[in-house]
Image (cartoon, grey):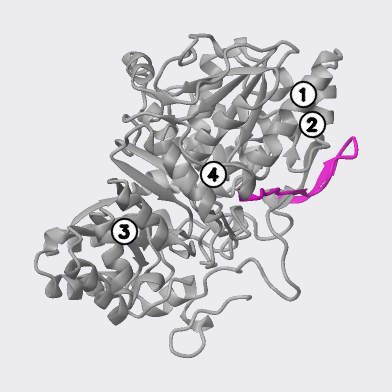
Amino acid sequence: MHQLFSVKPESRRIAVVNEQGLPLPRSGQYGLALCFPGAYSLGMAHLGFQSLFRILSEASGWWGDRFFSDTGSRSLVAHLPLRAFHLAAFSLSFELDVFPFLLMLQQAHIPLFVEKRQEEDPLVLVGGPLVMLNPEIVAPFVDVAVVGEAEVILPQILAVWAFWRARGATRKEVKLALSRIPGVYVPEFYTPVYEGGVLRAFETSHGVPFPVCRQWANLEDFETRTFIYTPLAYFRNTALVELNRGCRYRCRFCAGSCIYAPFRQRSLELVLSMIRKVLEWQPEKVGFVGSDVLGYPAFPEVVHFLRSSGKKLTLSSLVGKDLYGRSDLLELLRKGGLETITLAPETGDVSFRLFLGKGLSNDDWLELILECLRVGFARVKLYFMLGKPDATSIEADLEFLARLVRLIPSPSRLWVSYSFLIPKPHTFLEDCRAESFGRWKREKEVFERGLRKMRVAFSGESPRRAWVELILARGDRALARCLPELLEGERFLSLPSWRRILSALGRDEHEWPRLPWREGLKPWSVVRLWALRDGEGRSHEGLCGPEHRTGAGNHCCRL
């Protein structure tokens, strides 16, 4: 089968034997299936999915089990089919999660389209970053969508569903009741209206709100950590603890600052309590999670506490501006057991880097990377972005890296990872016109050739995969209804198949993916993620060419 949905029968047995932690309830009146459209190892390393375990364990009258795309069509522990549950809740993080999501429904013999489901079919519930950014790309297949943080919405859904179910309400009546919960989107009650291919409006029924406003939680009210520990998770022998949520920075391409705003911190007392609990399972490492981990005020205290427990820390990408000129912080991270430090300069084009909101000049970045190596990090991993609007940017990237390689002891101390600029809904770049697929392919070839010449190890995204992500990211319900066509023969990444779909919808197969909504409403207008201050613009009407820049390479924008 395709790599997005490969089943390994032995995974279920191996997984359960190695688990420790919170047992999910096995008895109750109603069943909740927690479904992850990816491998078991990825799902168990996903704090959003782990948080659902706690919510289920605290829900009165509910029992549940887990499903993963690589552990077969039956639940992980009880070996039950998905149809045996009343609710099937899916966590969707990325655009390509749509396909394993649909395949899991298909394999469970649950009708893909909402209108074809019967009273006895499970209610299909979805949440996660993908849903918050643009729920319309899954709207035809979804009974209920969670727009916001599950900690404040899912308990209400479970309580309201049980209340009305006990009173014999029909499927539609239950969904209408759920639509009254803040942050709940029921696509069935919203109809997109098009004129000549332009989305003009959403017609609503039954008094549902428009738009649906994202809900967020008080982090002091609950824990976010690993609740079921397995050494077989993607981050091997690692337990996870969330320090904060949101970010101090507003990088223009970053969806995270929209999804997780406002920036919120947990108390040191709560964080240390979570660390103590996960240490009971004797992991080798504890991973601190957050969009802005270094923005946690008591970060040094947390690291010292972990060191005193004899455990190492691990972190994801860190903000360069927070580390520049902070040798003390770098040394603290190194003493805490961090061996590879990950940074994201994104580009060697300083003006574009500043436009994105990343900060620091090239000289500053070089100084920071050299200091990372000096304090003893075995390797520095750098993220770069391809598909930028300036044709010379790729040359600036390689020139920056060549300067770096000349300054370091060995290119083996570097690892470069690249992806393509995909404008996401609700970000400042949602109206950005992406570069062409041909340009992406050429940039990939030039970039990789340059890295090989420098003998720098690298990994990168497939242009074809990224192009499909681009189509889905800003897609609408009309496009979504065509997605099941790609399940036959698993043609998810077949560009000829995508061209046929776009052509059938009357959309230019080359230009529509680059900037799909030039006028009218956007599909994601059905949700509101964050409120704007007076006079503040959210979107950017396309990254401008050289003739639209002002000053020394500054990029213009409506901010």
Q: Which residue is mark 3?
A: 342
Q: Residue at x 32, y 46 (%)?
A: 309
Mark 4: which secondary structure? Answer: helix
- Find the distance from the CA under tag 2 to the CA under tag 4: 27 Å
| Other residues around mark 4 within 10 Å, as few (<14) / some (14–19) / many (≥20) | many
Label at residue 48: none
Label at residue 161: 1
Quadrant in which the N terminus is drawn: top left
Q: Which residue is mark 4?
A: 472
- Find the distance from the CA under tag 1 to the CA under tag 4: 31 Å
Whichever of labels 1 and 3 marks the residue nearer the N terminus, that label is 1
Q: Quadrant of residue 418?
A: bottom left
- Residue 327 located left or right of residue 385: left
Most extreme residue toward the front is 308
Q: Residue at x 15, y 60 (%)?
A: 413
- Residue 25 spot, x, y in % from top left: 58, 17
- Residue 420 located left or right of residue 94: left
- Find the distance from the CA under tag 1 to the CA under tag 2: 7 Å
